[in-house]
Amino acid sequence: MIIDSWPLFGLVLRTSRLELRLPGLDRLAELADLAASGVHDPARQPFVAEWTDRPADEVVRGLIQFHWAAWGAWRPDNWSLNLVAIADGRVIGTQSLDGRDFVVLREAGTGSWIGRRHQGQGLGTEMRAAVLELAFTGLGARFVTSEAFADNHASYAVSRKLGYTDDGVQRHVVRGVPVVGRRLRLDRDSWEAARRVPVEIDGLARCRPLFGL
C-alpha cells in the first residue's frame, strides 16, 4: 500500500466539523474543480501568485501540478504539506504547513483558501487551528507565521482569533501594481493561551522522520 512507503497519506487532522488529510487523486481532482469554480471575488486578487486569473482548465492543471511538485520535492529540511479540508464528505478548501530547516529553526508557515460557497462559516479558523496543533503539539514548533494582503480582513480575523501578532510588512507586485502584505507571527505561549479548537491528530508517529524528527 502507498501508505507504507509514504506515511503522510495516513496523517489525518480532525476538528469538530473537518477532516484534513493529504489528497489522493480523486480528492485532488475535487479540489481542482473547486478552485476552478472560484475562491474569491474576481475584482480582487488576494494571492501573490495570480493563479486564479487564468482560464479554468489552466487553474485545474496548475493546481494538480503544484501538489505533485510538492510531493516530489519533499525533503526533511524543506517540506510543504498541502492538505485538503473535508466537511460532510466534500472538499471545501486546502490548508498548508511549510517548513524550511525546521529542525533548526522550529518555525513553519501556513497558507489556505476555501471555496466561495463555504466561506463565512468559521471553517477557516478550524483549518488553521488544525495545522497549528500539528505544528506546535505534534512537531514541536516554536513559531508559526502567516501573511495576507492589507485588505484581507477575513484572514486577519482568523489570525487575531488564534493569537498572532504583527511581524512587519512585505511588498509585492500583483496585477502590475504594488500591494502590501502584512506578516504575522504566533509563538508557542500565545498559541497555548488562545487555543480553543479541539484537534485530534492520527498517524503522525510514522511521519516524523519525513519532517526530520
Image (cartoon, helix red, strand yellow):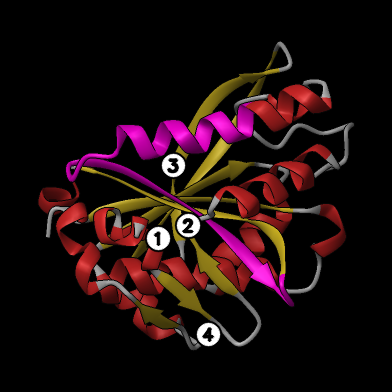
> Residue at left 13%, top 53%?
212
- Disc 3 from disc 4: Cα separation: 27 Å
Q: CA distance from mark 2 to mark 1?
A: 6 Å
Q: Earlier in the sequence, mark 2 or mark 4?
A: 2
Q: Nearer the viewer, mark 2 or mark 3?
A: 2
25 in relation to 86, above or below: above
Q: Amino acid at mark 4?
A: Val
Q: Secondary structure at mark 1?
A: helix
Q: Pointer 3: what residue?
A: 168
Cα separation between marks 1 and 4: 23 Å
Q: Earlier in the sequence, mark 2 or mark 3?
A: 2
Q: Secondary structure at mark 3?
A: strand
Q: Where residue 9 is drawn, which disc sits there?
A: 1
Of badges 3 and 4, nearer the viewer stands: 4
Amino acid at circle 1 = Phe
Does 18 appear in magenta?
A: no
- Residue at 72% across / 28% down in the picture? 59
Answer with the quarter of the image where residue 94 lies. Answer: bottom right
Q: As shown in the figure, which amino acid type bears the numbered disc 3?
A: Gly
Circles 2 and 1 in contact, beta carbons < 8 Å: yes
Sooner in the amino-acid sequence: mark 2 or mark 1: 1
The residue drawn where x is 46% and y is 82% is: 194
Image depth: mark 1 or mark 4 in front: 1
Q: Amino acid at mark 2?
A: Leu
Q: Which residues are magenta?
A: 62-89
Crowding around mark 3 (Cα neighbors within 10 Å: few <14, some 14 to 19, many 20+) is few
Quadrant where the image shows the C terminus? bottom left
Mark 2 lies on residue: 22
Element type where label 4 sits in the image: loop
Q: Could you say where residue 64 lies in the image, as x and y percent from the top left? A: 59, 35
Query: Which badge, 3 or 4, is on the more N-terminal residue?
Result: 3
- Please report contact status of discs 2 and 4: CB closer than 8 Å, yes or no: no
